[in-house]
Image (cartoon, rainbow, N blue to C red):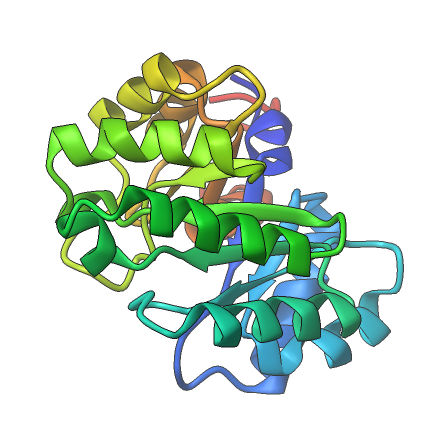
Amino acid sequence: MELEKILAACDHTLLAQTATWPEIKAVCDDGMKYHVASVCIPACFVKQAKEYVGDKLTICTVIGFPNGYATTAAKCFMASDAVDNGAAEVDMVINIGWVKEGRFDAVREEIAAVKAACKGNILKVIIETCLLTKEEKIAMCKVVSESGADFIKTSTGFSKGGATFEDIALFKEHVAPHVKIKAAGGISSLDDAAEFIRLGADRLGTSRIVKIAKAMEAGETAKNDGSY
């Protein structure tokens, strides 16, 4: 698979608690250079990043992150504030406790409310697969499909596990055709990235693919023909 195709699927991500504007700016510079799908950054940097990149790069941010247990009203405010500041895509974390209680109607209603707060912009729903049973994952595929959200996403990258091939295959089997899939957390190689895409992922949440591309450009990887 061509490197350019993998990069075009990447949400180039920096969500570290210690992130500074110079680091965010560097992520934006890399995002513009390597033509990624978006940069996924903390909400406090969205306005500054949008002013910096203009229309050259899509800005994505996270809300209810990473634990998901903020109130629905708080999540809606965060989503609305983010898009007002220039975010075109919002990744929200579900209330995982509600899933464990079987309160799927409440989860669906919350996602729908946050989608409305996104004012027509893209909403990705993080279900944190490493904390769910197979049955709960399948149930969440149905919930997300019915909620009006645009994507289902595996992971925050801040819990005990990230994306797996099995979860992407499960999503592909159970989500409605209009729902796209994002794999995130622990994607560390081009081979893994290509396999996630082959299995059905439309987006990849990772910082490592751009780092690999930079290393290849610097001659640290032998291949220079745009593939691997």
Query: Does residue 104 lie above or below 168 as drawn?
Result: below
**Where residue 91 sits in the image (x, y, percent)?**
51, 55
Residue located at (53% from left, 15% from top): 177
- Which of these two is toward me, 108 or 153? 108
Q: Is residue 12 left or right of residue 189?
A: right
**How many marks are shown on the rendered structure?**
0
Q: Nearer the viewer, residue 210 or 111?
A: 111
Image height of 190 relative to 17, above or below = above
Question: In this rendering, would 160 be left or right of 31?
Answer: left
Residue 219 located left or right of residue 49: left
The x and y percentages for residue 48 are 75, 81
Res 215 visible: no
Q: Quadrant of residue 224?
A: top right
Q: Residue at x 28, y 48 (%)?
A: 186
Residue 153, quarter of the rendered image: top left
Taking the spot 42% from the left edge, 44% from the top edge, the residue there is 108
Left or right: 107 as drawn, with respect to 48: left
> Residue 174 placed where, x, y %?
34, 17
Furthest toward the right, the residue is 55
